[in-house]
Image (cartoon, rainbow, N blue to C red):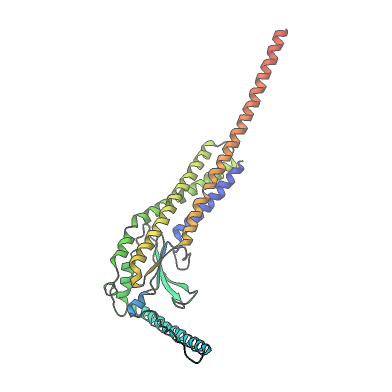
Amino acid sequence: MRPFALLPLACLIVTFVLGMLCLFAGHKPGFMEDYHLVSLNTSMLDHVLLNLPSATTSEAAPSSTSFGSWLENTAKNFSNEISNKVEEQLNEIVDDLADALAKELGTHQWYSLHLMNMCKGNYLPNATTKHSRKNVTHCTRQTTMYHFDITRQIENELHVGKYNVSLKEIGWPNAIQNGISALDVAMNVIFVLYTIGIIAAGLGIFTAFVAFFLHDVRLVLFGNILLIRLVFFALLISSIVVTVAQKKLTRIINKYGNDIGVTAYRGTKYLTITWVATAVMFLPSLAWMVDFCIGRRIEKRVYTEKSGGLFSRHGEAALRRSSG
């Protein structure tokens, strides 16, 4: 038995599970929704349609009077309190109107891109409430080499809606979809590399299991080492591509979408599990390296002991012949 095979076995199992989660995150409503590649907040798009900016009030600078500074401060505090209440009420009215318009238009307040599909939904109780949560209403069917076409998605929803508004009327820039489509190749590369890594990890689990119970299986051990390296480099490259793709996607969407109320956010949780899976696969290489060094040292010691014993027996025989 090889005790060192336990560490590669455990690491391969962890990586296999994390890789599967990277592939199937968001495959149905409520399943790892927060583990998306990129999330789009389109809740302010309704405000743009309403043409109602956020309610703000201007505060006039108070002037000194003869009633004393205490009266001036009292009036200022009262004015600020009234102003804040009016501002809050106006913002609530705007938010209620935007939510009502969103229902009439048929649009959703957020869209999330996963590796093989897309999910969408609304914020509860609304998008501007602190600590609001995502309510998933629908996830598309998972497909390999998924193409994220947010422009067509929103346009279809607008056409189905009551008012049949077009993206052209909103001023939706084509640069958003052009930038997303330019990264389709990167998304396909990520999918292929994850698939290779998961398959190699599955084979590595089998070979590590065999190497644990059998001692002198150099071919199996060599194959396990090759599989571990394949998994590591596949996940390393895919994690790098994910990091770069997330950064470019969010930059493009925020650059052209802020003016119409569309904001993009990177999926930090997805980044965490893909890089953890990559880091975990670095440990088995160290384990097999230590096992190899220890095995070489033991073999060298055994060879030395056998050689020393053989030479001593030959010497004794020579002495007996010379004395005879």
Query: Residue lying furthest front in this view?
Result: 66
Query: Residue lying furthest left in this view?
Result: 168
Q: Is the N terminus in the top left, top right, bottom left or bottom right quadrant?
A: top right
Point 52% across, 87% down: residue: 69
Whether residue 10 is situated above or below residue 253 in the rendered picture: above
Task: Note whether residue 259 is visible.
Answer: yes
212 relative to 60 in the view: left or right: right
Residue 98, horizontal then vertical, whole percent? 38, 80
Is residue 194 or residue 91 the one in the foreground? 91
Query: Residue lying furthest right in this view?
Result: 323
Is residue 132 or residue 90 the one in the foreground? 90
Point 60% across, 41% down: residue: 2
Residue 124, horizontal then vertical, whole percent? 46, 76
Task: Note whether residue 106 is visible.
Answer: no
Q: Is the C terminus in the top left, top right, bottom left or bottom right quadrant?
A: top right
Image-quadrant location for residue 319: top right
The mark tally for this picture is 0
126 relative to 149 in the view: left or right: right
Image-quadrant location for residue 246: bottom left
Query: Residue lying furthest bottom in this view?
Result: 67
Residue 233, horizontal then vertical, whole percent? 45, 47
Residue 6, horizontal then vertical, whole percent? 59, 46
Whether residue 265 is situated above or below residue 72 in the rendered picture: above
Whether residue 233 is situated above or below residue 161 in the rendered picture: above
Point 42% across, 82% down: residue: 91
